[in-house]
């Protein structure tokens, strides 16, 4: 058995612990994958408001005519106002379809807790699917994990992580715990509900979070987070850690030390032997840090395998895949943890977020945070250059990066890395490309030409499909048309 098969079967086997289904054996894994689509998938994420409030035929006509969209990805369950497309005042959020409560056993939520009230009794999936099908558009449920604890929903906090000080987290970089049975039951119930209750085209789940140690060390595009509130030491993670032979108290002490290291770096207090030496010494003194790191990463993979198996046990032909957070484009550390080969046993497609225009500001934020800890011995310019070399990029210098963003070459390289990473397994790559994702002040803006270049780069990199991102309502019509022009030039639509 080669390494790829070993990883695939190991994660699928671990996932059986959540689903109660026997792990797949040998090459049987490939039999659950859907057949390849006869046309190139052209996806479009969209917030819920226009789907609930607008006339749908003109909406879908516009998507089809401008860019040949044939797959819709609504944010169908969300507790974040911008994904629902509504103002934050008085916001509740939740399921914008209709929860069927028979699928939510041992979940501490009621129908009232889960049903989003913003659009009354409208079942958005029931409203959208038949109209979308008439236009040749499949509807995928896009389940992007919330980064903010919904205060309006009682008991939701019982599913959230607990930091190493014993405090319940309330938002990014924390979130729901993958080892918490309440959250497992909720998510598996949700995907079962959508799969059984609606004629959907597939499911895409995503989590824009990373492991606790990387957050504690400020190695994130969301730099500046509290390094003391970054990981999970809840009762379920502690049990799983002990089952793995990890000394939980030593791991907790390691996080205390890592938190102090980061806070000292932010205060400009250079370690006696330099930042990198102090970082390496921290790992040597507390090897439990890396063990706990691996626990978090593998727990998410087990959780994803459970989602995959739940859907496949109901409809083996339904595609299931994953949104991959763009932070992996900036962090060689997270890149090491999210090796694409690990996804091949429980994925039909992957959607790496390759937002090249907005990436300039995000990359600079990563550099700023990294210089508080691991890269503190280097200047910002040197840090960026080292990261470019480690990530195999050839991009703009530090002082021009915000204005230029990353190039279409970045999109092509990262697409090719994903295609090569799955190594010929039946996992399609559908990158998400940037069309008017909001940018920081001073950053560049998309044009029809720049969007077209990114679209062409995706297919030059070997992708089988593309998801025009991140939200239809943010896109300027001329830039969406720029994507369509490139797709027509490539004979993809």
Image (cartoon, grey):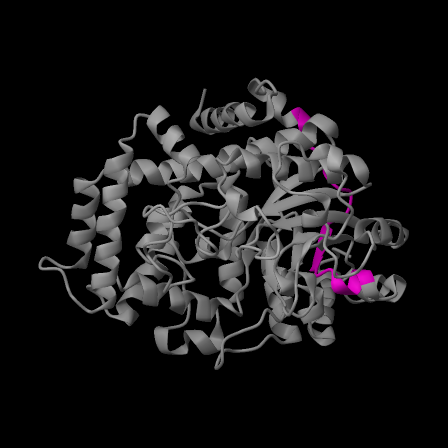
Q: Is residue 92 above or below residue 478?
A: above
Does the magenta run of residues contain 33?
yes
The part of the image, by quadrant, that contains residue 475 is: bottom right
Report the front residue among 58 and 229: 229
Q: Residue at x 78, y 65 (%)?
A: 50
Q: Residue at x 61, y 45 (%)?
A: 205
**In x, y percent, where is residue 190?**
68, 40
Q: Which residues are magenta?
A: 31-52
Q: Quadrant of the C terminus?
A: bottom right
Q: Which residue of the protein is positioned furthest toward the front in this rendering?
A: 154
**In x, y percent, where is residue 411?**
53, 59
Q: Is residue 147 above or below residue 424?
A: below
Residue 341 visible at all = no
Q: Residue at x 44, y 55 (%)?
A: 173
Report the front residue among 305 and 329: 305
The part of the image, by quadrant, that contains residue 350 is: top right
Q: Which residue of the protein is positioned furthest toward the left in this rendering?
A: 272
**In x, y percent, where is residue 3?**
43, 27
Q: Is residue 321 above or below residue 73?
A: above
Q: Quadrant of the N terminus?
A: top left
Apparent side of residue 268 relative to residue 419 in the rendered image (left or right): left
């Amino acid at each position: 058995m080669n390494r790829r098969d070993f990883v695939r079967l190991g994660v699928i086997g671990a996932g059986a612990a959540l689903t109660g289904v026997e792990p797949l054996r040998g090459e049987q894994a490939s039999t659950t994958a859907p057949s390849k689509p006869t046309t190139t998938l052209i996806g479009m994420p969209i917030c819920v408001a226009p789907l609930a409030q607008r006339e749908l035929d003109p909406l879908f006509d516009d998507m089809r005519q401008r860019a040949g969209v044939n797959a819709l990805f609504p944010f169908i369950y969300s507790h974040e106002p911008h994904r629902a497309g509504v103002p934050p005042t008085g916001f509740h959020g939740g399921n914008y379809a209709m929860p069927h409560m028979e699928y939510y056993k041992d979940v501490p939520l009621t129908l009232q807790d889960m049903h989003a009230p913003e659009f009354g009794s409208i079942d958005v999936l029931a409203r959208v699917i038949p109209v979308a099908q008439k236009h040749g558009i499949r509807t995928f449920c896009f389940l992007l994990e919330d980064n903010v604890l919904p205060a309006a929903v009682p008991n939701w906090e019982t599913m959230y992580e607990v930091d190493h000080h014993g405090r319940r987290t309330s938002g990014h970089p924390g979130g729901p715990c993958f080892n918490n049975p309440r959250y497992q039951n909720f998510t598996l119930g949700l995907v079962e509900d959508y799969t059984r209750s609606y004629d959907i085209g597939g499911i895409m789940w995503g989590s824009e979070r990373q492991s606790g140690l990387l957050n504690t060390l400020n190695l994130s595009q969301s730099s500046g987070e509290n390094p003391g509130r970054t990981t999970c030491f809840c009762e379920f993670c502690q049990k799983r850690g002990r089952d793995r032979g990890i000394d939980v108290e030593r791991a907790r002490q390691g996080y205390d030390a890592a938190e102090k290291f980061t806070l000292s770096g932010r205060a400009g207090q250079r370690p006696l032997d330099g930042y990198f030496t102090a970082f390496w010494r921290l790992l040597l003194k507390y090897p439990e840090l890396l063990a706990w790191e691996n626990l978090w990463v593998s727990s998410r993979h087990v959780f994803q395998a459970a989602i995959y198996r739940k859907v496949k046990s109901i409809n083996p032909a339904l595609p299931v895949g994953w949104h991959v957070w763009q932070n992996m484009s900036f962090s060689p550390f997270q890149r090491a943890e999210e090796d694409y080969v690990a996804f091949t046993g429980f994925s039909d497609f992957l959607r790496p977020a390759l937002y090249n225009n907005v990436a300039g500001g995000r990359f600079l934020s990563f550099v700023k945070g990294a210089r508080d800890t691991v890269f503190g011995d280097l200047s910002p310019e040197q840090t960026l250059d080292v990261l470019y070399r480690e990530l195999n990029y050839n991009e703009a210098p530090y002082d021009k990066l915000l204005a230029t963003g990353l190039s279409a070459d970045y999109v092509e390289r990262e697409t090719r890395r994903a295609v090569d990473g799955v190594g010929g397994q039946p996992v399609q790559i559908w990158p998400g490309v940037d069309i008017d994702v909001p940018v920081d002040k001073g950053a560049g803006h998309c044009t029809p030409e720049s969007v077209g270049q990114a679209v062409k780069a995706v297919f030059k990199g070997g992708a089988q499909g593309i998801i025009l991102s991140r939200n239809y309502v943010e896109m300027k019509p001329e830039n969406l048309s720029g994507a369509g022009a490139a797709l027509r030039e490539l004979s993809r639509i």
